[in-house]
Image: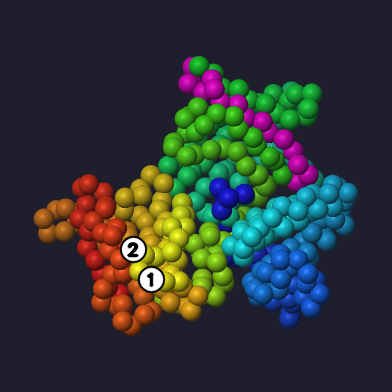
């Protein structure tokens, strides 16, 4: 689940939310006064997770009341066991976001043919799958996937086996002889398994085709936020950074293709440092997010600029944000240590934001 750590906010959440009666938006599906497990307590402590839990329950009840009811019950139990392995709110937010997409797109009979989308909580590892010319013997498929700025496409034919799954093996002509894909139905969705790395399957660095795919006319994944991406640990932190950055909040999200928790900030007790970057353009599309438990934030956001400098050199702008008045005129050490590490042909310009 971590690699696909959820393209509008009105995606699966809005679809599920439309099913709720007024007043239920922030309530969990269970009695929080009786919350016993660590997972239940985390859900009850977060209005956002409580709302998602209620939305998920409404959607699940619709699926369990229709065809494949027994299969859906088993599937939900398996998901709950996986959910309960989460150790923080960020993991739970990702788990709920992805499950909502699965349940929201679970109505109707299953047909192999059509447009399928990989369930991706991050928005940085999307994949579209088109299946056509389905017969008792096999199907034709086409993938269009990406990982950050890198992309990959693959077309081919997969043959149905005795296991009722469709199997594809590449060929030397296309340099994909080490690529194997298995397409397996799981109630309303397709689970794609891949053997061979991105290069073996003819894709760019880090681009894979495996994962869970649901059928939809357009990408059903909801827009991610910093909590879902694992950049912060609580909804309050996400809200605080959203308020601080304003319009640049989305630019920060766009840098979070890969997220690394760098631990405590040297010389700043209680401050956590998180680094992000986009695969393929990491030298100038990245960020550092620093925060503490008291709602203080220090954020550096690097992004390439469309216009070059007077000398014709390309410019990467470093925007620095903080809500700590004493730190507004100087970069903290963890950010300052990453100065001037942009692409070789670019020059860094620092902009201290008010």
- State the scheme by which the image is colored: rainbow
Which of these two is toward me, 134 or 208? 208
> Does the magenta segment cover residue 159?
no
Residue 175 in sight? yes
SS type, badge 2? helix
Q: Is residue 241 visible?
A: no
Q: Position of residue 45 (x, y in %)?
A: 67, 75
Circles 2, 1 touching at the beta carbon (< 8 Å): yes
Residue 44's place in the image compared with 288, above or below, is: below
Point out the frontmost of discs 2 and 1.
1
Q: Which quadrant does the C terminus fall into?
A: bottom left
Q: Nearer the viewer, residue 132 or 287?
A: 287
Residue reaching furthest bottom? 325
The residue carrying mark 1 is 268
Q: Residues within 10 Å of mark 1 (few under 14, many from 20)?
A: few
Disc 1, SS: loop
The percent position of residue 72, horizontal first and vertical second, equals 82, 51
Q: Which residues are magenta?
A: 173-188
| Residue bearing the label numbered 2 | 334
Q: Residue at 85% across / 56% down in the picture?
A: 64
Judge left or right: residue 119 versus residue 268.
right
Residue at 57% x, 43% y: name it.
Answer: 128
User: Is 42 drawn above or below residue 337 in the view shown?
Assistant: below
């Amino acid at each position: 689940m971590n690699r696909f750590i959820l393209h509008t906010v009105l995606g699966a959440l809005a679809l599920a939310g439309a099913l709720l009666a007024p007043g239920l938006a922030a309530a969990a599906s269970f009695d929080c006064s009786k919350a016993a497990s660590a997972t239940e307590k985390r859900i009850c402590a977060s209005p956002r997770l409580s709302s998602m839990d209620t939305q998920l329950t409404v959607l699940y009840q619709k699926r369990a009341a229709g065809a494949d009811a027994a299969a859906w019950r088993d599937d939900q139990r398996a998901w709950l066991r996986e959910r309960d392995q989460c150790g923080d709110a960020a993991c739970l937010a990702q788990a709920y976001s992805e499950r909502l997409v699965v349940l929201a797109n679970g109505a109707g009979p299953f047909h192999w043919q059509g447009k399928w989308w990989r369930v991706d909580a991050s928005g940085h590892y999307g994949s579209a799958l088109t299946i056509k010319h389905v017969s008792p013997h096999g199907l034709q498929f086409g993938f269009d996937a990406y990982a950050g700025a890198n992309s990959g496409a693959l077309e081919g034919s997969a043959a149905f086996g005795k296991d009722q799954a469709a199997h594809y093996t590449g060929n030397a002509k296309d340099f994909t002889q080490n690529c194997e894909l298995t397409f397996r139905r799981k109630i309303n969705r397709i689970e794609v398994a891949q053997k061979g790395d991105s290069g073996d399957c003819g894709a760019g660095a880090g681009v894979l085709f495996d994962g869970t795919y649901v059928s939809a006319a357009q990408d059903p994944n909801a827009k991610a936020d910093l909590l879902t991406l694992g950049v912060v640990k609580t909804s309050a932190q996400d809200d605080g950074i959203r308020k601080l950055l304003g319009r640049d909040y989305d630019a920060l999200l766009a840098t979070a293709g890969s997220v690394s928790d760098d631990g405590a900030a040297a010389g700043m007790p209680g401050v956590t440092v998180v680094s992000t970057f986009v695969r393929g353009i990491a030298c100038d599309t990245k960020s550092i997010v620093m925060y503490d438990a008291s709602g203080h934030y220090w954020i550096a956001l690097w992004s390439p600029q469309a216009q070059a400098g007077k000398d014709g050199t390309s410019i990467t702008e470093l925007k620095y944000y903080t809500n700590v008045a004493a730190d507004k005129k100087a970069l903290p050490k963890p950010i300052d240590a990453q100065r001037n590490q942009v692409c070789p042909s670019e020059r860094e310009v620092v902009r201290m934001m008010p």
